Every structure is written in C-alpha cells, then in structure tokens.
Image (spheres, rainbow, N blue to C red):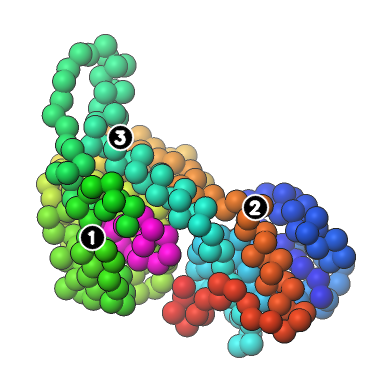
Amino acid sequence: MSIVICFNNKDPKPWQEALQAKLPNATIEIYPNVTDPKAITFALCWKPESNILAKFPNVKVVQSVGASVEHIIQSQDLASDCVVTRIVDDRLSKDLFEFVLTGILSHIKRFADYQKAQKEKQWQQKPYKTIQNTSIGILGLGKIGTHVATKLAQVGFTVKAWSRSEKTLENVSCFHGNEGLINTLKNTDILINILPLTSAIENILNLKHLSQLNKNGYLINVGRGEHLVENDLLTLLNNQHLSGALLDVFRTEPLPEDHPFWKHENITITPHIAAITNIETASDIVVSNYKSLSNGKEFINVVSIQKGY
Ligand code: GLV
C-alpha cells in the first residue's frame, strides 16, 4: 500500500512532505525512485509520462493534483478497475473567479492600452465599457464554471453560459447543445473558456465559433490550450474582429520561446496560474482517498473515465 508521485512540470517535493506529515506511516515515493513497484496502489499524478502507470501493476487509484484529469486519461492505459479522482476545492473556484474578474476589468478599462501609451508618454483618453454594458459568455459549467458564472452575474455583468448537459442557474442564461453554443457566442463581448478537455471539444475555439462574438470581442482561455486553434485566434486578432485575448493555458507548456503569441501586442500571457492547487487543502482530499482505499469507503471526486471529466 504505497503511494507514488508522478509529476511533470511541477515540483513533487512539497506534495511528498505535506502527505508524509498527514500519513506518517505511509511509504510515499517520487518516480523514478520507487523501491517496490508492485507495492504501489495509489498514484498521485500531474501530466504523467505516457503509460508510466503500467510500471505499477497494482495501482487502484490515480489521483490528479489538479481539477482536470485529461492529462491522466489521455496518457495512460488504465486497468478497468482503476479509479481516477481529481481535486475539487472551493479555493480553486474562488481563485479562478478572481483571475477572470481581473482580466475582464483590466480589458474593459483598457489597462493594456494605457500601459502601451505610458511607454510612449502619450496622454490619450480612450472610450471604456462598463460592467452593465458588457456581455459575457462562459463555456463550461462544472463546479468552477458555475461559481464563475454566478459571481459574474452578481457583479452585474450580463452572463450566458454553455454546458454539455442542460443546467439552470440564477441570473445566468444557460444553453446546451450545438445551437446553444451559437446562442452563447452571439452578442457576446467577452468569452471565457473553462471547459475540461475531451476529444469532442478539442479545437472548439475556432474561426467559426470565435467569429460569432461581437466585433472587438475578447477571449479569456483558462480551459486548455488544445481547445484553441491558435492560427484562427491570430487571424481574428489581425483582422480586428477580436480586440485581444488573455491566455493562461497553451498546447505546449511552457510556451516555446519562438511562439508568435509572446510578441503579439493584443495577447496577454500568464503561465498557467489562474488557479493553482493549494497543497494544504488539496492534500486532505488525497489523504481521504488514500484512506478509503484501505478501509473500503467511497472515494471522493471520482471522474468518469468514459466521459473524460
Ligand atoms: C489546472 O489547470 C488544473 O487542472 O487544476
């Protein structure tokens, strides 16, 4: 009954320490330094190498350290009795809302334009939008998307949201299905993508869909890089249908040095920091699932491997 930590692009040490403090008797090892691969029953993962879990034939639970699981489901050949779980933490929803709100307000109040103007010592007043006259579209109404949609509506934005299955939310116009997607995009100033990644919605942020947004529309992508057709975004920015984008996630992370997004004056890049898992609170979820494995209790935050989220 040991735990293995398989991370890429994330430091495993703080996780090992936090878990060891809460589970003093457990063996918690960081891949590739595993003494007995057959003893591993629980794997804690972030973007694990392709099929790495095949090295641990007795793994029963694969726990993501983030809200997402596509990095596990799409990279591993999981045994049919394997359970995949994720982090669901109010902290993640709150942090994501704060990130998105900052992005929206700095966009409608034109902070990026003033930063540029300041560099050139230009004193030039520009028109701005208000909360009341800004319409927002949200793609994805999972736990985090629901929180963001509800809070933005409370702040006073006009909010529409799209999800795969039908949902209802107070003060948010909810849509689903193909037609619902177009309704969410039309008459929308700012589109926020919070979808999980599945093969059905890869490339959903494409020319056809993004050109439905209002002229001077703005994109905030906090879902996954694979949702976005990068050249389509560049086309819509360069022909000025869209006025800008705030991107926190990318097809390749870290974003390669020669990527055109770095230099685009209307793209703001953040390094996948919109909502970072809080180790202190999230490790409680991991501990709970690890204990459930030994005492036969129900796991929390189990995902559907078939649906992919
Ligand atoms: C972040 O992207 C996460 O999956 O938690």
Q: Amino acid at mark 2?
A: Ile
Highlighted range, magenta: 137-149
Mark 1 secondary-structure assignment: loop
- Of residue 119 and residue 196, the one placed in the foreground of this image is 196
Q: Amino acid at mark 3?
A: Ser
Q: Which mark is residue 106?
A: 3
Residue 8, percent from left and from top: 63, 56
Badge 1 vs badge 2, beta-carbon distance below 8 Å: no
User: Quadrant location of residue 265?
Assistant: top left
Calculate the distance from the C-alpha at mark 1 to the C-alpha at mark 2.
33 Å
Look at mark 1 in the image and give the residue it sits on.
171
Q: Earlier in the sequence, mark 1 or mark 2?
A: 1
Placement of 1 over or under 33, stated as above or below = below
Q: Quick one: label 1, few (<14), some, or many (20+) residues within 10 Å?
A: some
Judge whether residue 49 can be spotted in this image: no
Q: Amino acid at mark 1?
A: Asn
Q: Residue furthest bottom?
A: 80
- Of residue 86 and residue 11, the one placed in the foreground of this image is 86
Mark 2 secondary-structure assignment: helix
Q: Earlier in the sequence, mark 3 or mark 2?
A: 3
Look at mark 2 in the image and give the residue it sits on.
279
Q: Which mark is residue 200?
A: none
Mark 3 secondary-structure assignment: helix
Q: Is residue 143 magenta?
A: yes
Calculate the distance from the C-alpha at mark 3 to the C-alpha at mark 2.
29 Å
Badge 1 vs badge 3, beta-carbon distance below 8 Å: no
